[in-house]
Amino acid sequence: MEDRVEQTSQAIRNEARRLFEADEIDVFIGFESGSLPLSSRPAFLTAEEIAQDPSKIDTLVWDSFCTSNLATYLLRYYANEPNRRKKREKPYPRVGIAVKGCDCRSVYTLAKERQVQRDSLRLVGVPCAGMVDVRKIQEQCADEIVACEEVDDSISITLRNGESTKIDREKALRRSCLECRFPKPENTDSIIDTPARKPGDGGRATLEAFEQKSSDEKWQYFSDELTKCIRCNACRQACPTCWCKECFAEHTDLKWIGVGSDLTDAMVFQITRIYHQAGRCVECDACYSACPMGVDLRTYTNRIAQDVHELFDYLPDFNPETSPPLATFSEADSNDFITDPEQAHE
Amino acid sequence: MSDTVGCTIEKKLLPTLLLNESKHSRVFIPKQSDGVTEYAVFGKGDTPDLEAGQSRLSPKSFFFPQTETLYAFDYDTIEPSASEEAAEAPVVLFAVRPCDSASFELLDQVFGPENHGYHDPYYEKKRDNTIVVTLACNKPGSTCFCTSVGGDPAGTRGADVLAFDLEDRLYLEGLTTKGKEFLARNGEVLKEAAETDREVANTLASSARESMPAVEYDRATVKKNLDDQFDNPIWEKITNTCIGCGACTYLCPTCHCFDICDEERHYKGRRIRTWDSCQYAQFTKHASGHNPRPTKTERLRQRFMHKFSYTVESVDEVYCVGCGRCVRYCPVNLDIREVLREFSST
Amino acid sequence: MGNQVGDVATTKPDSTAETTIAADDWQPSIVAFLCNWCSYAGADLAGVSRLQYGPNVRIIRVPCSARVDPQFILKALQNGADGVLVSGCHPGDCHYIHGNLVARRKFAVIKKFLEHIGIESERVQFSWVSASEGSRFAALMNSVIDGVKRVGPSRKLVKEL
């Protein structure tokens, strides 16, 4: 049998080629091999380019390093750009996009928020086998990684000192992927025939273990993590659902937080950013993967998604009909957290 | 090569040397924790991790901190900031990599006395009080490209003392008055170097030099192409993958854009200088609301123009030392080396 | 008296060992966001009825509890408030029909999240008080003050200038 990576990549190329040939799309967003080992990066193929050089399609790949959430890149096609006229002269471009389970859920979340037009998209679903946490691989290597090759379920690594090792892919996966509830995209226009991993528990077990910590221990952990933060905003920029034209952190007439490296400012930034993701975060871990300092954001994005699920029985899934939970309400919502002085005094 | 008499120190005596220094200076040494290398204060019992390689964050923050209080004020007084006083204390930066110490010289052009007679007392004071001990790289990283931008794995730019790692001992050479004084006052733990030591050091340096892949970069061509192609749509293509975070600029040893703002509460406050990044939406945004760089295309272009064109024109320097941090930590693998290659051809 | 309640800055004790501070020595400062139509009127009624409650609360009147962005709460904590209370109309009684129901969702999420990062649950509280419940308001204030006193001065998330 052919190797999974090659097979998936080939299937995506075929689908992209078909979409271009049928004139269904103007641009296709997928992944190509990056310039470093263990990296794949977003690739943009336009119909013009493909008409000139059809072989460009062969640059598309799909391996275990496609950690970015491609839905991030859709927003610009629908945004009214600054300093330009609001009225749109051209129709929305027709975009083909390869989506993992999480990317696909982001697309539906954005569609509900009217940030993308679902009709102009061609979603090519790629059932996901999980993406790798490059840091987990680096931890296992004594020297710098200079080359890597992925074949089925193992990743062969060549180090600078000439040694080579094999790493079990499953052991290097991101936590969000190991715990992912929706590895298989749904409601797509087409789907690649490749196996998805078994759905996980959504991080319930990890969170329960974390909950055992005392308030001060939790605070210590949060402080330790946020001390690493350099306020580069990679988390925000990598996030598909962080689409505000002007982030609260950048308001200057109403200054919510300081711009310096003060720890509490970094904390308030992160608390607010993650809180804003309530009911919208698809736990794709794009923020964690983007962070140059390796701040553990997963523990917190996972929590907010879990909280919303428990409180309002909502998970951002593939259903275009449901309302985002914080844009609506129910009379039956829990009142448990409300301080009742009469009860408190009993 | 030079008439300087070099000296050597056995590695096991390094803590003694650093302990001596720490009696009158704050000494910073490379340390590794959680896979991240950083410069930490030397304390009794510490040994510098000379194998740790490049630090994640560039040491520019020793002279140009991410947040710096310029002064504090209350309703009727202005006080010099604490950081200004702290800057009086002498500092030893031990085992800085040549690319990073070269960046200090570039920063001098901005904040130092070379800048048209303009003085930045905050920067200058710290710079004057610091001894930079540069450690030549025996094993350059896979993303390093200092040789392509005029640097060297055994470069002396910005260094007061240059050290070579000769396995069991270090070969040291004083380059500046400050550096020679440093060696002179630590004479008891140093030995006069043998003729062969310098030869071994030279061999190590040239083998390191040869191990580095050449990046296609010609200063004049790139500058000309950048200037000519300011409006070239190629920029939009390059920007495709960019998510607009500031990781590259915050990790960069030569990026030096800053912002000044006030933080106040209860009739007292402080004026702080913080890092700014050309990648942010607020960068050079006018008070009128107009932004000369409205989208990330213009902002990304600014980053390259500034480094490879504007500074070549103004101070005849390229503001890239080839440390490769932006290559390594860009969340979407937007590789500066590839951009240079793009602008190298006509 | 060194413990002026109004000035957040001066109520900060120097010692970080909160256990050594007797409850009488330290008075928390609490910021309360009260909705104009119910809770603020409830506070008013408590006042005109001369009901006694701790003087630790600084009230900020908002049009509706839904006006309270969780960022207000974070900002208050960052600026040194020892506790934050948000109170609005009882569910079903909102002047704007369902403002407080929308707000309830936000508050439920942020309260849980703040506990998850390690902010004590007494520190940030939410309640409903109607315009006729002066005594409930006084009781609520005392209960919030007691709760905040129990966890001591706020140290987490306070920005030092």
Image (spheres, helix red, strand yellow):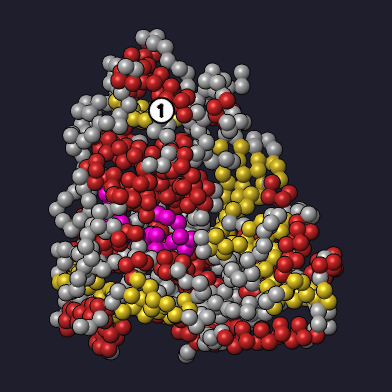
On screen, residue A36 versus residue B168, left or right, reads left
Disc 1 chain ID: C
Q: Quadrant of residue B297?
A: bottom left
Camera-side residue of A76 and A285: A285
* Residue B36 in the image, given as x and y percentages of width and height: 53, 63
Task: Please give the name of the residue rendered at 51% of the width and 60% of the height, measured from the top-left corner.
Answer: B34
Q: Main secondary structure of the magenta part?
A: loop
Check the image and report above or below for C144 versus A8: above
**Quick check: A176 above or below A120?**
above
Q: Is residue A270 left or right of residue A105?
A: right
Packing grade of label 1 (10 A; few <14, some 14-19, many >=20) is many
Displayed quadrant of residue A12: bottom left
x then y, percent, for residue A45: 29, 79
The residue under label 1 is which amino acid type? Ala
Tell me which segment is drawn in magenta: A276-297
Q: Can I make out residue B129 in this image?
A: no
The percent position of residue B14, horizontal first and vertical second, equals 73, 66
Count the labels in the image. 1
Q: Splitting the image into 4 quarters, where does residue A155 fall?
A: bottom left
Element at badge 1? Answer: strand
Above or below, A48 relative to A237: below
Q: Which residue is mark 1?
A: C32
**Which residue is at 65% across, 43% downward?**
B72
Q: Is residue A166 visible?
A: yes
Name the spot of residue B201 as percent of width and height, x first.
71, 82
